[in-house]
Amino acid sequence: MHNCKANQSIGCTVTSCEYHCNEADYCSLDKIVVGTHEPNPTQIECTDCTSFKPKSACCNH
Ligand code: SF4
């Protein structure tokens, strides 16, 4: 993402996300929502960033 406004409070390594700052491992959103896809989450893998948006969904790259 060009002119990415890195939110220093939200570190992220998901480079395939539309909101990821490529030059730095930060999210560019002011706020994200973390959720889960499990009925009873017990491990780190059970949590998800529900604000994720695939880069391919946007044509500005
Ligand atoms: S929306 Fe979620 S997955 Fe996407 S860059 Fe921000 S924190 Fe990462």
Image: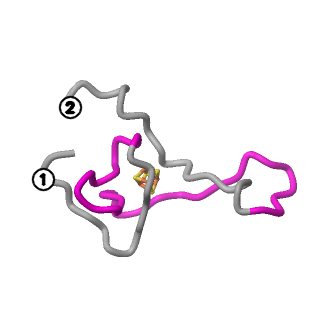
Label 1, residues with CA under 10 Å away: few <14, some 14-19, many ≥20: few
Q: Secondary structure at mark 2?
A: loop
Residue 43 circle label: none
Q: Earlier in the sequence, mark 2 or mark 1?
A: 1
Q: Is residue 17 above or below residue 36?
A: above
Residue 61 circle label: 2
Residue 39 falls left or right of residue 29: right
Q: Secondary structure at mark 1?
A: loop
Question: Which one is in front, 15 or 9?
Answer: 15
What is the magenta range?
16-43
Mark 2 vs mark 1, CA separation in Å = 12 Å
Quadrant for residue 18, please give it: top left
Three-letter code, disc 1: Asn
Q: Is residue 4 magenta?
A: no
Q: Is residue 42 magenta?
A: yes
Residue labelled 2 has its Cβ within 8 Å of some atom of ligand 1 = no
Contact, mark 2 vs mark 1 (Cβ under 8 Å): no
Residue lying farthest bottom? 9
| Residue identified by numbered label 1 | 3
Q: Position of residue 16 (x, y in %)?
A: 40, 40
Residue at left offset 48%, top offset 45%: 52
Q: Position of residue 21 (x, y in %)?
A: 28, 54
Quadrant for residue 26, please give it: bottom left
Three-letter code, disc 2: His
Label 2, residues with CA under 10 Å away: few <14, some 14-19, many ≥20: few
Residue at left offset 20%, top offset 31%: 61
Check the picture and name the quadrant holding the N terminus.
top left
Q: Is residue 44 above or below residue 48?
A: below
Residue labelled 1 has its Cβ within 8 Å of some atom of ligand 1 = no
Dominant SS in magenta: loop
Q: Position of residue 9 (x, y in %)?
A: 38, 75
Residue lying farthest right? 40
